[in-house]
Amino acid sequence: MKEGDYVGPGNILGLVRETPIFEHRILLPPHLEGQIEYIQKEGLYDLKDSIAHIETTLGLIEISMLQRWPVRQARPYLRRLIPDTPLITGQRVIDTFFPMAKGGAAGIPGGFGTGKTVTQHQLAKWCDADVIVYIGCGERGNEMTGVLMEFSKLMDLKRDRPLMERTIPIANTSDMPLAAREASIYTEITIAEYYRDMGYDVALMADSTSRWAEALREISGRLEEMPAEEGSPAYLASRLAKFYERAGRVQILCDKAGSVSAICAVSPPGGDFSEPVTQHTKRFVRCFWGLNKELASARYFPAIHYMESYSEYLDLIQNWWICRIDPEWRTLRDEAMHILQQDFKLQKIVKLIGEDALPDNQRLILEGARVFKNAFLQQSAFDEVDVYTVPEKQFFMLKVIMHFYQRAKVIIRRHIPLYRVMQLPILNNINRMKEKISNHDTESFHLLLEEIDIQMNELEKESMAIL
């Protein structure tokens, strides 16, 4: 911008290199427009220094780099856009089975020890957002200390820079005043909207909204307001709705696109998903990642249960996968999900009569689901290869498992015993491909597919010779 230019609400007046990987854009406040009478030259300035004079209908107004905004009021934008681009997290159970779109809202409910905080940490480290705003709302002080210390040491491997250079942590520990806890959520989303207005994709992590709801309940009680279900204030649902409504992918005031993706943990007492905060959250989010205590106890992470979770963004983002990755993606994903759903139903029968009493075609469903759980859904945060999976590798892993399952299905129909299929050496390679094959090694997946066919064909020939 230069003197004499006309600027509108949200236009960029200047740039500040906030970190080596992040450019802070100085915006004209949303309620102002006019002609630039004077603008500072490049140099070093304080936050409150005047950097420009704008001639408006209200007169000459000095603009500084500091902006003030009421946190309970949403920042304006031109219009909402369809959230049709996935927020790639590198976590297979999320990206493939329960994907989230940029500008979407997701809830992560789970009891104590199920991995809510760890899941959010993984998303903050690996999701493809430009800016991460992370708040510990009512969390224990040692947890927030751990976040601050860990994030300052971690590297953003995509950019080869410290992760903290794109992360804004907000600490609100459990010993802070209730009013501060109640306001902290609004502070976080206002900061996220501010960076969204610069044209960035922002991921907002809130841990957890249940503690925010507890603050609402205590404040409501001290004000002697009429309580609703389980002592929560009657306006709990409307407050949650207003909060999640502020997430979204929008066309900002300067005609660019930006997004705020809200990923909020919920801590239901005793893991009871029927309590008010979880139930109201399900009403207002379109992505629900339900964490399961049994999976977490079995050291199975991420402990996202495939029967308690869902995503309403699947139809919106499938074109991205189909066009960028492979046209087969949606078909393979739906077939895999069907196997997992059938497995869930069969597990109830297995508990009564045992797995050996089932016919081979049903046992194949159990074995196929077991391969999916171990080789695909389970992911290690401590393995250098397995910690993050690019979309292309996710698709090939899915294709390999489904190809093995479909070939096994054909063999079972030819009356070849299932145990012969499960003894094939290739199965060990399938179970270990997540840590043995790197993200961009597509050739190894093609060789794996060929090896499946070779071993399956040999098994068929041996069986036909015996018959």
Image (tube, rainbow, N blue to C red):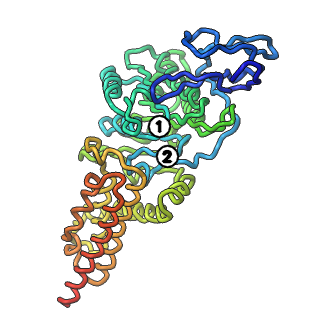
Assign the N terminus to one quadrant of the image: top right
Task: Give the residue pinned by disc 2.
Answer: 100
Q: Residue pushed farthest right?
A: 57
Q: In terms of secondary structure, where does tag 2 sit?
A: loop
Q: Amino acid at mark 2?
A: Met
Q: In terms of secondary structure, where does tag 1 sit?
A: strand
Picture quadrant of residue 126: top left
Disc nearer the start of the sequence (2/1)? 2
Task: Give the residue pinned by disc 1.
Answer: 263
Q: Amino acid at mark 1?
A: Ile
* Picture residue at 33% right of the left edge, 36% below the top: 118
Q: Is residue 216 visible?
A: no
Give whichever of 259, 447 is nearer the camera: 447
**Labelled pair 2, 1 in contact (Cβ < 8 Å):** yes
Answer left or right for 104 relative to 175.
right
Picture quadrant of residue 9: top right
